[in-house]
Image (cartoon, helix red, strand yellow):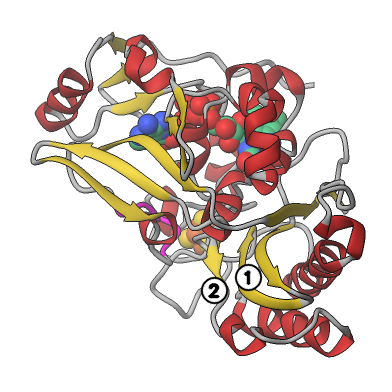
């Protein structure tokens, strides 16, 4: 058995306001933001990051609030995933968000893990999420300071996969992300927080941090399903969130988002073509096909890329079928979580 890897010595900066946190990031863009630490500390121990200091944002009270109005829910970036999983208002308004929060890691992680940290999670690949000696033995890749990608040696980009569970739920629910930076605050659609590049998948400018999420209440039915190797806790091989609305029996809104397959969580295009139709076999087959055609898994996990593509497509079919079932429309049917 290998000994646990020690944390390097690190300076901690502890701002109590968003402005002070932004100022610390502007002063040194290499400083890393520390929220729950459940992802960051693992990466520090493995030597994947070597920041001069950590900006511990957990003392910023305004980031730890959940506020509900009739038409939206505002969730601070520091809100813990166990709180999202247990809050009855989240469950009744945004089922996909609750199901995604419950699907993250294990209960001990969820007590510390924050929604902001989940959105800003580093991308993952079997060639980098290893100890420093493993990486040294294999040779560095683009993401770890080398000159070649071991997954796609002919290419110039990193294909490490975004594997957060919460982002697809927020994308399907059409949520906006509030970002604070030196120029003040701005909002982007959740899907627009990301790039398709495993080395720099977040579209955050220098000095910016995520401060809150705003989720509209307009979409009635939603859910999240993931497949993973260990059912007790594991990152998704693929995860799918769907939010939809029906009028009569016909679809009047449909959003599908996928995680675990690309370097960003992906909003599936072309779902508007299914509006006005009943959720029947032909619609389920069409949704499955849309997902299978648009996801781009690469060999970044132990499972073959084609398997992850098939899993994502099958999850989309299964989840849409469950959301379209008569008891789901009455708010009772779909249980969510792991497929
Ligand atoms: C064994 C294990 C299993 C796991 N399984 C899963 C899983 O199944 N699904 C899953 O989604 N995750 C999983 N994780 C990863 C992690 O626990 C979660 O993603 C968690 O939600 C991360 O949140 P955090 O607050 O701990 O983030 P941190 O570790 O504090 O931060 C994560 C990253 O986000 C950045 N960051 C944090 N907050 C902000 C902010 N407000 N603005 C800008 N940047 C920010 C940090 O600098 C860091 O790069 C697992 C981790 C472990 C160790
Ligand atoms: S996809 Fe390529 S560059 Fe990116 S982490 Fe994996 S091996 Fe490295």
Q: Point out residue 224 in the picture as x, y percentages from the top left corner.
A: 73, 52
x 60%, y 75%: residue: 296
Q: Main secondary structure of the magenta part?
A: loop
Q: Is mark 2 within 8 Å of ligand 2?
A: yes
Image-based side of 79 in relation to 252, left or right: left
x 46%, y 51%: residue: 175
In 3D space, how far apart are the residues under numbered discs 2 and 1 (Cα atoms)? 8 Å
Disc 1 designates what residue? 298
Q: Residue 311 or 142: which is nearer the viewer?
A: 311
Residue 181 within the segment the image draws in magenta: no
Disc 2 designates what residue? 152
287, above or below 231, in the image: below
- Split into 4 quadrants, where in the image is the C terminus? bottom right
Q: Which residues are magenta?
A: 197-203
x 57%, y 25%: residue: 113
Answer whether labels 2 and 1 touch (C-beta < 8 Å): yes
Residue 201 within the segment the image draws in magenta: yes
41, above or below 202, in the image: above
Q: Is mark 1 within 8 Å of ligand 2?
A: yes
- The mark closer to the camera, 2 or 1, is 1
**SS category of the residue bearing label 1:** loop
Question: Hey, which quadrant is residue 80 in on the image?
Answer: top right
Farthest residue in the front direction?
248
Tell me if I can see residue 7 in this picture: yes
**SS category of the residue bearing label 2:** loop
Q: Earlier in the sequence, mark 2 or mark 1?
A: 2
Question: Hey, which quadrant is residue 30 in on the image?
Answer: top left
Q: Residue 232 or 217: which is nearer the viewer?
A: 217
């Amino acid at each position: 058995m290998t000994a646990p890897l020690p944390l390097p010595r690190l300076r901690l900066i502890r701002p109590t306001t968003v402005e002070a946190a932004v100022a610390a990031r502007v002063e040194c863009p290499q400083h890393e933001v520390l929220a729950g630490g459940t992802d960051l500390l693992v990466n520090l121990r493995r030597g994947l990051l070597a920041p001069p200091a950590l900006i511990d944002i957990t003392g910023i009270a305004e980031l730890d609030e959940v506020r509900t109005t009739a038409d939206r829910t505002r969730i601070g970036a520091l809100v813990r995933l166990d709180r999202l999983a247990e809050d009855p208002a989240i469950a009744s308004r945004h089922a996909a968000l609750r199901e995604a929060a419950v699907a993250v890691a294990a209960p001990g992680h969820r007590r510390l893990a924050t929604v902001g940290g989940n959105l800003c999670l580093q991308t993952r690949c079997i060639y980098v999420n290893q100890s420093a000696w493993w990486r040294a033995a294999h040779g560095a890749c683009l993401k770890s300071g080398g000159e070649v990608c071991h997954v796609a040696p002919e290419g110039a980009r990193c294909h490490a996969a975004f594997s957060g569970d919460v982002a697809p739920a927020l994308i399907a629910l059409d949520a906006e992300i509030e970002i604070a930076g030196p120029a003040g605050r701005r909002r982007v659609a959740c899907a627009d927080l990301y790039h398709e590049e495993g080395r720099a998948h977040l579209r955050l400018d220098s000095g910016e941090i995520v401060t809150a999420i705003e989720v509209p209440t307009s979409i009635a039915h939603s859910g999240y399903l993931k497949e993973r190797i260990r059912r007790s806790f594991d990152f998704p091989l693929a995860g799918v969130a769907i939010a939809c609305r029906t009028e009569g029996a016909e679809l009047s809104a449909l959003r599908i988002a996928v995680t675990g397959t690309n370097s960003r969580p992906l909003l599936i295009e072309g779902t508007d073509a299914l509006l006005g139709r009943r959720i029947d076999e032909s619609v389920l087959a069409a949704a499955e096909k849309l997902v299978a055609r648009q996801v781009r898994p690469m060999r970044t996990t132990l499972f073959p890329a084609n398997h992850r593509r098939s899993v994502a497509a099958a999850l989309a079919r299964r989840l849409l079928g469950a959301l379209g079932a008569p008891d789901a429309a009455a708010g009772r049917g779909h249980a969510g979580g792991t497929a």
